[in-house]
């Protein structure tokens, strides 16, 4: 029995170690092939992808239809709203949505956890391709925007800000239903390990 528990412990520990070491850190690892302002935007998008995906994985499937009030988006709708923006908004900087994509009603198209997580990953892959494909020379191009003007540089900033707003919304939702964001759990575990570790040079 003890041997079985030891094997299980080692398996679980190795999974935790792998997932912790695999955390995205573009500020350290860089954004190969992309430099300058686009690199800075891409770094933020990569962090957002990691956090959205990990949070979506942490939310129980039966909570995907949960919403804090009748007139606001559910978990599923928030996640799909972000996906829709990833697919739709990058057309403004030169990358059209995937064939067959219809933004109308997209955020209400499914409540299936597995499908939504797959869609999050695919939509962020679309976003990263769009940023990578965009020429630096286009950043200062001007276009009509909400009755005024904006540049493609500003559009990228808007898209990142939009996703950040909904990431904060999703984190607040998670906290309300008792889910600690996975990256916060990571920090808490590291702090606990550091506290419990013997002082250097002491047994």
Image (cartoon, rainbow, N blue to C red):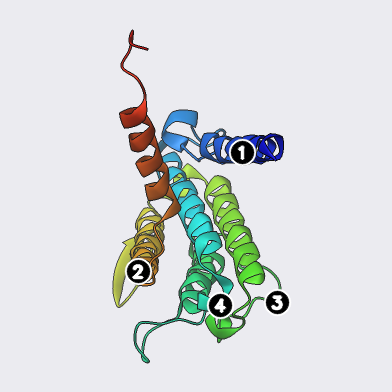
**Separation of marks 2 and 1 at Cα, in angstroms:** 35 Å
Label 4 neighbour load within 10 Å: few <14, some 14-19, many 20+: few
Above or below residue 114? Residue 32 is above
Q: Residue furthest front?
A: 1
Farthest left residue in view: 148
Q: CA distance from mark 2 to mark 3?
A: 29 Å
Of the numbered discs in the image, which one, if any, rests on residue 144?
none
Q: Which residue appears at 31% of the width and 17% of the height? A: 199
Instruction: First in sequence, mark 2 or 3: give its number.
Output: 3
| N-term mark: 1 or 4 | 1
Calculate the distance from the C-alpha at mark 1 to the C-alpha at mark 4: 28 Å
Label 3 vs label 4, nearer the camera: 4
Binning the other alpha carbons within 10 Å of mark 1 as few (below 14), some (14 to 19) or many (20 upward) gives few
Q: Nearer the viewer, mark 2 or mark 3?
A: 2
Label ID, residue 169: 2
Q: Residue at x 60, y 51 (%)?
A: 129
- Neighbours of disc 2 within 10 Å: few (<14), some (14-19), many (20+): some
Q: Residues within 10 Å of mark 3 (few under 14, many from 20)?
A: few
Q: Quadrant of residue 1?
A: top right
Helix, strand or loop status at disc 3: loop
């Amino acid at each position: 029995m003890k041997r079985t528990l030891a094997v299980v412990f080692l398996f679980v520990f190795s999974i935790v170690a792998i997932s912790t070491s695999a955390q995205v850190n573009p500020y350290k690892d860089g954004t190969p092939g992309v430099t300058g302002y686009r690199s800075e935007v891409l770094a933020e998008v990569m962090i957002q992808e990691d956090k959205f995906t990990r949070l979506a994985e942490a939310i129980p499937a039966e909570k995907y239809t949960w919403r804090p009030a009748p007139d606001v988006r559910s978990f599923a709708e928030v996640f799909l709203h972000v996906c829709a923006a990833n697919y739709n908004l990058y057309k403004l900087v030169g990358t059209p949505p995937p064939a067959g994509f219809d933004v109308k009603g997209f955020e209400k198209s499914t409540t299936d956890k597995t499908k939504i997580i797959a869609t999050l990953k695919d939509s962020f892959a679309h976003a990263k391709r769009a940023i990578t494909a965009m020429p630096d020379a286009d950043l200062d191009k001007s276009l009509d925007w909400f009755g005024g003007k904006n540049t493609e540089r500003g559009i990228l900033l808007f898209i990142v800000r939009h996703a950040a707003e909904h990431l904060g919304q999703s984190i607040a939702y998670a906290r309300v239903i008792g889910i600690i964001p996975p990256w916060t759990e990571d920090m808490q575990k590291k702090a606990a390990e550091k506290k419990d570790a013997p002082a250097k040079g002491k047994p």
